[in-house]
Structures are given as C-alpha cells and as structure tokens.
Image (cartoon, rainbow, N blue to C red):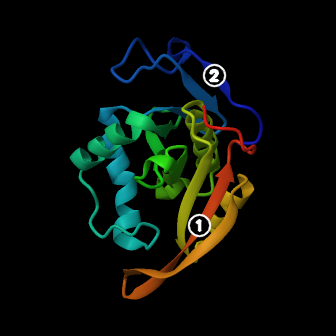
C-alpha cells in the first residue's frame, strides 16, 4: 500500500477480455489489487468472506452469518449515501471489502460515518486492509463525510495497529458491551478527521 494509487478507466484493465456486468467507469489499481465499487453480484463472495468473522470470532458482534441476499441489501444501503468497495486480486477474485455507514441516525451526525473492513482470512496482513481503507476514506470525503469512526472489539492488536497507522486516534472504550462466545467484550472507538477545521459542512 505504500505509495500512491493509480486511477484509470475500466477499459484499460488488461486482465479483462471485453465488457463485463461489473465493469465501472473507474477503478483503482494498487499494489494489493484492484479496488472498485461493489456490485450486486459481489454479495455472495462478501458473505463468504464475512461468515468466519461471525462464526468464529468476536470481531463481529453478529451471531448468524448473513445470506448473500442479506449482503446484497447491505451493499445497496451503504452505497445510497456512503460507499462499499471491494478489492480484487489479479485473477478477478474479491479478497476483501470495506464500507461506510451512518454513525447515528440523528440528522446532525450526517457528516460522520462508521467504517469497517474485512479481508479473506488467507489475505490478512497483506496490506489489503490499508488499501481498502484509504480508498474508502477518499470516497467518503468526496461525499461530504468529515469524520470516520471505527469500533474495534478488544483485544485486537492487528486492527488497533491498522487504525493507528492510518491516522485514527483512540477516543474511548465501551466496557463489557458485547456478550459472545461465552464472555463479555469491550469495544474501543477510533476516530479519524478528514476535515480538521471548524467550517460549516458543505
């Protein structure tokens, strides 16, 4: 992920032979793969990536993995006002995704968003999370979001380290707010400001 990303039209991706249903006006090529907007056909793969986090860990506080149909609905909802991005490897397989959503439902929170990133288990530590998060931050900034917030079930040193490396600052901890796998879990909150001045939102 070190270094800049390169934006180019989808037609310039040599690995693709002709147009596909998931072609986009623009994608982002990075050292970890290609970042693009999610499309409905990505839902089964996103659900597959997410399921082990739900079943086997407290990283997610869900207890039942969502279906592909559920995931398609989440993708559509996120893209309405925020964003949902996927990361493809050179073979076109989705290996991770990141998305933004509302921080709170009240109108005054409109310019803040929660963010999450998930990678295929075999790809953790590959730099894909950093790539997705940076692309997501850029996209959300373009949509007027000024502050990003991420909740991290504790302890989770890799996730805490990723957020700190990307400019998130720890802003507080909710104690024993989640019960999963037979124990209580704390949630640490991390915040990154995309706009640091006190000007009114655009």
Q: Is residue 14 above or below residue 112?
A: above
Residue 133 percent location from the top left of the image: 60, 46
- Give the residue at x 29% y 61%: 65
Residue shown at 63% from the left, 72% from the top: 172
| Mark 1, residue position | 189
The reply to whether callout 2 and callout 1 are in contact (CB within 8 Å) is: no
Q: Splitting the image into 4 quarters, where does residue 74 fall?
A: top left
Give the left or right position of residue 40, taking residue 127 as reference: left
Q: Is residue 133 above or below residue 14?
A: below
Earlier residue among tags 2 and 1: 2
Q: How far apart, in angstroms, are the residues tagged by discs 2 and 1?
A: 31 Å
Q: Which residue is mark 2?
A: 7
Q: Residue at x 71, y 60 (%)?
A: 164
Image location (x, y in percent) of residue 129: 59, 50
Residue 171 in sight here: yes
SS class of the residue under badge 2? strand
Foreground mark, 2 or 1?
1
Considering only vertical position in the picture, is 128 above or below 143? Answer: below
- Is the N terminus in the top left, top right, bottom left or bottom right quadrant? top right
Residue 97 visible: no
User: What x and y, as percent, mark residue 146?
Assistant: 62, 43
């Amino acid at each position: 992920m070190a270094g800049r990303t390169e934006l180019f039209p989808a037609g310039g991706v040599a690995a693709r032979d002709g147009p596909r249903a998931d072609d986009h006006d623009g994608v982002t090529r990075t050292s970890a793969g290609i970042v693009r907007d999610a499309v409905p056909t990505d839902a089964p793969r996103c659900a597959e990536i997410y399921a082990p986090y739900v079943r086997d860990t407290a990283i997610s506080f869900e207890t039942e993995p969502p279906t592909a149909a559920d995931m398609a609905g989440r993708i559509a909802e996120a893209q309405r006002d925020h964003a949902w991005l996927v990361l493809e490897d050179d073979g076109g397989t989705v290996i991770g995704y990141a998305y933004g959503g509302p921080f709170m439902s009240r109108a005054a929170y409109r310019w803040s968003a929660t963010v999450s990133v998930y990678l295929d288990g075999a790809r953790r530590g590959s730099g894909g999370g950093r790539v997705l998060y940076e692309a997501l931050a850029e996209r959300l900034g373009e949509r007027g979001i000024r502050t990003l917030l991420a909740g991290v079930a504790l302890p989770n040193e890799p996730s805490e380290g990723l957020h700190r490396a990307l400019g998130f600052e720890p802003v507080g901890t909710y104690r024993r707010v989640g019960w999963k796998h037979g124990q209580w879990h704390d949630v640490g909150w991390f915040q990154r400001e995309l706009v640091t001045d006190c000007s009114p939102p655009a």
